[in-house]
Image: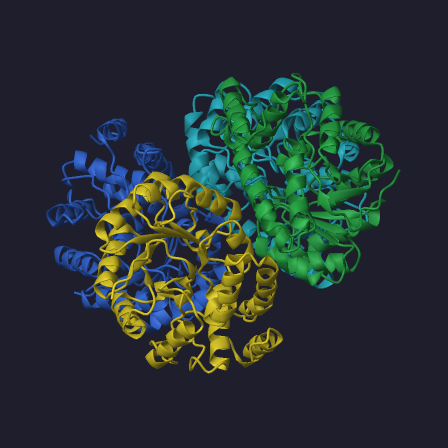
Chain colours: A blue, B yellow, C cyan, D green
Amino acid sequence: MARDIKGLRGVVPPVVTPLQGDFTVDYPSFTRVIEHLIAGGVHGLFFLGSTSEVVFHDEATRDRILAHAVGVVAGRLPVLAGVVDPATDRVIGHARRAASLGVDGVVVTAPFYTRTSAAETVEHFRCVAAGSPVPVVAYDLPVSVHSKLARETVVGLAREGAIVGLKDSSGDGGGLRYVIADMADRPDFFCMTGGELDVDGALLMGAHGVVPGLGNVDPGGYVRLYEAAMQGNWAVAKAEQARLCRLFEIVWCGVPRTSAGASGVGGFKTAMRAMGIVATNTMARPQRSLNAEESARVEAIMRGAGLL
Amino acid sequence: MARDIKGLRGVVPPVVTPLQGDFTVDYPSFTRVIEHLIAGGVHGLFFLGSTSEVVFHDEATRDRILAHAVGVVAGRLPVLAGVVDPATDRVIGHARRAASLGVDGVVVTAPFYTRTSAAETVEHFRCVAAGSPVPVVAYDLPVSVHSKLARETVVGLAREGAIVGLKDSSGDGGGLRYVIADMADRPDFFCMTGGELDVDGALLMGAHGVVPGLGNVDPGGYVRLYEAAMQGNWAVAKAEQARLCRLFEIVWCGVPRTSAGASGVGGFKTAMRAMGIVATNTMARPQRSLNAEESARVEAIMRGAGLL
Amino acid sequence: MARDIKGLRGVVPPVVTPLQGDFTVDYPSFTRVIEHLIAGGVHGLFFLGSTSEVVFHDEATRDRILAHAVGVVAGRLPVLAGVVDPATDRVIGHARRAASLGVDGVVVTAPFYTRTSAAETVEHFRCVAAGSPVPVVAYDLPVSVHSKLARETVVGLAREGAIVGLKDSSGDGGGLRYVIADMADRPDFFCMTGGELDVDGALLMGAHGVVPGLGNVDPGGYVRLYEAAMQGNWAVAKAEQARLCRLFEIVWCGVPRTSAGASGVGGFKTAMRAMGIVATNTMARPQRSLNAEESARVEAIMRGAGLL
Amino acid sequence: MARDIKGLRGVVPPVVTPLQGDFTVDYPSFTRVIEHLIAGGVHGLFFLGSTSEVVFHDEATRDRILAHAVGVVAGRLPVLAGVVDPATDRVIGHARRAASLGVDGVVVTAPFYTRTSAAETVEHFRCVAAGSPVPVVAYDLPVSVHSKLARETVVGLAREGAIVGLKDSSGDGGGLRYVIADMADRPDFFCMTGGELDVDGALLMGAHGVVPGLGNVDPGGYVRLYEAAMQGNWAVAKAEQARLCRLFEIVWCGVPRTSAGASGVGGFKTAMRAMGIVATNTMARPQRSLNAEESARVEAIMRGAGLL
């Protein structure tokens, strides 16, 4: 059952992809992750984002992941799929396959590896929008893509209908605020923050939702934060945000033995293993998985945040 | 016929991938490019490098490109294939397919998009080497990958046998010199510079060859430069290098209308079109192709360098 | 009259330094700027920050600026002075001279130009604190300094008493939130945001104040925003912030003819000239000053924000 | 006795500034450094460069350093002085004081800390040239300044007479080669490389000299390398360069306990202490000085390069 993602609101976690010890996807765990998130009250699900280790998965594996995800969700929530690869026609290829598998929208970054100009980046989104059977959400993630989507780029693409929303993981709160203001007359366009730590502030400025990696671990926390903000209960929102910030410290337990990236998603997986949701905390190669000592630190933080 | 790439020496151009106006590969032009390079006297061919727009091509297209290339080369020269994608298992997948298609070695970057630590990067190369049926060459390209392969990383991987060579496009001449010195007792390991402009200096410091994008346009120039250097005729090498530097100015004719990347490879394609080798100067999407005015500037530079 | 800056709260603008056409300081205008800010209800004044073009001024000029400022303020408000130069002993020299001129605290960046490690940066702040007769505030400005003050660095220095506050212009809202949380038991330590665009969010997360360059133009706006936040009137705070964001667009009127830096402070000076506060909008060399057309754009934005 | 620096050629070391344990300049050691370099056969001396820890010294200390240096040199060699600070009028102030103290030329970077556009950078050099009583040399050091001097900037300033030379520490060999080629008709303009490791290659491409920090330790090595290159003895030049590269490894002995900057200049000072030239290896605050164990590593490397 197709869902319209225009005007999407709320908490839309980027869903982790559980792996088995041999680095293949652990589908029973994956099912449990999805049910855990739906039970947590989230408003949509974003598969194959950076938190899902999307760029570690080849075309065939991505297809299996999306097919499984769409099947488990079964229309209960809108489903977004990341279609992340360096350049335009590959992204279109991913988008077509994702759409045929039943996702409701695709999430697209600027080109990477190749050095692309701002004008070529606009053209990239136009081509992908023209080639994708489902709506396109722009994904601004300079830490991975090494370029920033300019306010003019996002607003221009939004007004011409090439994109229906923005997931802003740039950390540039001022820039997000301007996009929200520029698009205030277009409530069908959504702006979500990709950060975990500033969600109360982002919602205060008018963001329409949040795409928190930490939402894999504690979806209910983000849902409570979102609902408090929607009701104007900013003191409640702030207190929930403060608790989630303490919990977020699970993302640094692997560093410096692992990379920052492996420590972050690895922290989520380790926490979900402690909660009985996933079977292993294995990270895709060449990333290191958190070891026993690092896992113990993750669990201590979870207890401090009232989660274990 | 398999060729041993250990101890490879000389000029190994990263071969451009000619496109038709509809962005599909133009195979008749591609054949002409390969014959042009072989006729120019080069010592090996590197397909699916950055100059080949590798990251714009999906798995199936890459396979067709390599199958065609291997068929045309027909064992006359060693064939390297770039297996460039963000993470380990995808790279292994590319390497296996490339090997099955008959290439003699694969060229591998560090992971990108994902933020990987130095230790994880070492593990990446080890995994790829273990998974690849053919030898691995390390490809250091910080401008695209956004990390630099450390001297210790390269030398360690070389000594343990995980890599048989280095293509250094980092622009860090001092770093290259240290790797060459550290590996001086191992003549089967090769170090090539990926730059076009400093080849005389690189060969003076002991580099074993060059992988020049501009070699698509003027393979003979780089072959003469290489041979002069091998004979210790540094004045001749320097003069040839100076001429090639003038010619290299074709890479900036598209900027700022196009990105730097599109202007560079686009300059090569435009020059090769003027020489009757390729049918169009089309760049993969979303890159802009050089227009008539920019192409005229390319041709003027070619005439100044004695090429038209 | 010395003021204790411990526990400082509120709006503390980084005061622009008006220049005459010959690039010398325009002291009558400077007096008017200070009176304008005090009349606007601000809670402190920060001289010789980046917005004051501090690094353009030599030792003697800085002394004259501070002597004038202290004289005009005459104890009505706490006075902070930036002591910005690349390395430790020069910063100490600035701090001693500033203290002798009567400032209440000094604002100190990490070393720049030189590449300093995190441990050496800690030592830098310790040395400056030991050498400065007045309290030290840490100034985190990666866009100029090219390093970020880590949470551990700031909290460690705060707990050992080397710094009494933080001006965070890093744009890293999550990082600021952690420092605030880590120092929650120490209300004498203050954390202020240096950004103009996210002040409602920063105050919601518990920041103790704001150091807005735009506060030179509209001090009353930031005071209203601060007071609304202190009263928990987040809707009012948000609306005021939205108006200030529209006004902030004056900072881009010079680009690309001028640098971003010259356009920003130049926009403030141009606005203050339109309000009759400063005589010229001259920027220190080699920065370009806004021309008539660019100034007209500034004034149009001011009218749109209800300021002219 | 004034020396004309136009058409300067050869080895021009950036002279270290020896310190006493209390961080003040050790003038007797400084005298020995200068005599050591002159005895080594160098062709000019560059005081107050980055290797001299210029930005750690305030105006009065810089004056004393230059007065001492000019007195010791006593006209035997051309004397260049770095006038490094963030912005134009301060640089002019330094240049005037340096000129009045008898230096033959000043070495000027682009503005730093402040974000300056390319056009403003051109204006910076023009203003400094107009305000300096002695000729100006452009200093390209992106690692500290965080911007690169474009080929067009350097060549334009050279042709209009604003600068008489370039010290290129950018590591961009291709860029240096283009400047040399563009200015080939103007032998009074000099281009020197600031790198230690690629001097043979730089001289092969036509660079007019070298400004090697390592020349403080082994001036004779760089003089031999330069002379061999001038005679076209490239095999000799290469061998000398290879030996100097081994010696250069002294710059990494402090890392990671110290910053890279402190380890580099600290390595030079430690080596010179071992040679009896300077009394301490003290680095300006907040940099850490090499300890006994690190110093032992420096000395082992020196022995390996035939220097102790």
Residue B181, position as x, y percentages in the image:
46, 42
Q: In the displayed image of the protein, which residue is found farthest to the front?
A: B231
Q: Quadrant of the N terminus of chain D?
A: top right
Instruction: Kindly tell me whether residue D133 is visible in this rendering.
Output: yes
Nearer to the camera, B10 or D189: B10
Q: In the displayed image of the protein, which residue is found farthest to the left?
A: A28
Count of number-bearing discs: 0
Report whether D70 appears left or right of A120: right
Report whether B153 appears left or right of C176: left
Q: Residue at x 38, y 76 (%)?
A: B35
Nearer to the camera, A5 or B73: B73
**Image: D190 above or below D43:** below
**Image: D180 above or below B244:** above
> Toward which corner of the image does residue D72 lie, by quadrant?
top right
Instruction: Kindly tell me whether residue C255 is visible in this rendering.
Output: no
Q: Residue at x 39, y 81 (%)?
A: B21
Report whether B196 appears left or right of D166: left
Residue D225, position as x, y percentages in the image:
63, 43
Nearer to the camera, A17 or B263: B263
Residue C294, position as x, y percentages in the image:
68, 61
Q: Quadrant of the C terminus of chain D?
A: top right
Nearer to the camera, B31 or B118: B31
Q: In the displayed image of the protein, which residue is found farthest to the right?
A: D1
Report whether C89 appears left or right of A258: right
Residue D82, position as x, y percentages in the image:
73, 39
